[in-house]
Amino acid sequence: MAKLRVGIVFGGRSGEHEVSVTSASSIFMHIDREKYQPIPIRIEKNGAWSYPDRDPRASNVAEAIQQAKTTSAAAPRSSDPALNALRLDVVFPVLHGPYGEDGTVQGLFEVADIAYVGNGVLASAAGMDKAVMKRLFASHGLPVCPWHSFVRADWDRDRTAVMQQLAPLGLPVFVKPANLGSSVGISKVKSSADLIPAIEVALGFDRKVVVEAAVPRAREIECGILGNDDPEASVPGEVLPSREFYDYQAKYLDEGSRTVVPADLPPGMAAAVQRLSVQAFRAIDGSGLARVDFLVNGETGEIFLNEINTLPGFTNISMYSKMWEASGVSYTALVDRLIQLALARHADKQRLRTSGL
Ligand SMILES: Nc1ncnc2c1ncn2[C@@H]1O[C@H](COP(=O)(O)OP(=O)(O)O)[C@@H](O)[C@H]1O
Ligand SMILES: [Mg+2]
């Protein structure tokens, strides 16, 4: 049987470029070579795409990309002859943050009619915007902590009114740009004097801001989702940040953050987390994969959905992979399942009628 040709699209224009390179290297290294021929496709920070003009022989993604001879100046179109020459059966986008995890690159694959791994345009976009995501969760009756969101125009027009809307949240609160990741632009505000500066920091990253009540002594519990219309949940894991909260420094710079998989949870809580994760995935109409993150009140045990990540970190030692490993699905099997889910979703779409009566 001929091997399926899998384009691994990585890098990208977001601040999470380096994380993406690491995830792509892991996939390239561990993908089942009996079944698949991986082809690296790198998006530079300036948005240019590069891909090899012949099948890479190297087993390491950096070397493979060195062999890339063809560089297209901008994002390729489906009619791009060099891209066509790669004869891809499916693409695996491992891009985090804006232009990768937010539905934009997924839209490109839709237009090009290429099967791709993971969430579609809608789920990706909804999962990227913390305000839209919370509204979807809330409308499905899922537990989210009290929050308020507003846009720069509201703030510029009448900040006293915005401050009044924020008052019921009390303190401390978390102030976040609506569309970002890696905790960039997020502040924990404990005194009212710090609220305005924190809002201005967040508005520097996005025109939309989310302010939410802090969950006391929050435990950070995460759960992996795998599947399309019948999603399965992994065993939950826990992150123990090295700092007061899981900020950028704790995520990427300190060595001290720890993860515990499976998480040590009171009876019944693991099942509740798994059930909520599946519901959250359905609320955004997800497909393929997601990592659902929770904040559990350390005093009362109350569970809140924090966010859904539609393209979580995907190295072989990332939380997502570890939670599936602990659930009996190896990294190589995970990559295989995700590719098969992408092909199934694409085949499903081919069956739809495209004309009226
Ligand atoms: N309401 C909250 N209560 C307690 N901690 C929070 C709250 N919101 C965020 N945090 C802390 O901030 C971190 C980053 O927030 P999050 O919304 O997950 O942003 P990102 O998308 O950048 O990961 C969380 O992992 C957690 O440590
Ligand atoms: Mg987070």
Image: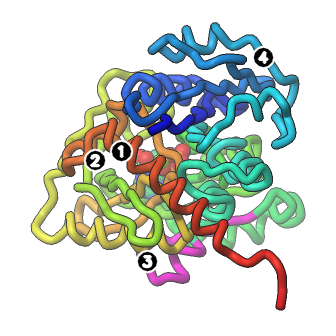
Instruction: Tell me the mark number nearer the camera, choosing from 1 and 3.
Output: 1
Instruction: Tell me the mark number nearer the camera, choosing from 4 and 2.
Output: 4
Location of mark 4 (residue): 70
* Label 1 neighbour load within 10 Å: few <14, some 14-19, many 20+: some
Q: What residue type is labelled 3?
A: Leu
Q: Which amino acid does label 1 sit on?
A: Leu
Instruction: In the rendered structure, find residue 142 and report the number of the disc placed on it.
Output: 3
Write the residue at 50% across / 82% down: 140
Pick whichever, 43 or 249, lies toward us: 43
- Label 4 – label 1 distance at C-alpha: 30 Å
- Label 3 – label 2 distance at C-alpha: 24 Å
Which x, y percent locates residue 85?
74, 29
Location of mark 2 (residue): 324
- Label 4 – label 2 distance at C-alpha: 36 Å
Label 2 sits on a secondary structure element that is helix
Classify residue 226 by image quadrant.
Answer: bottom left
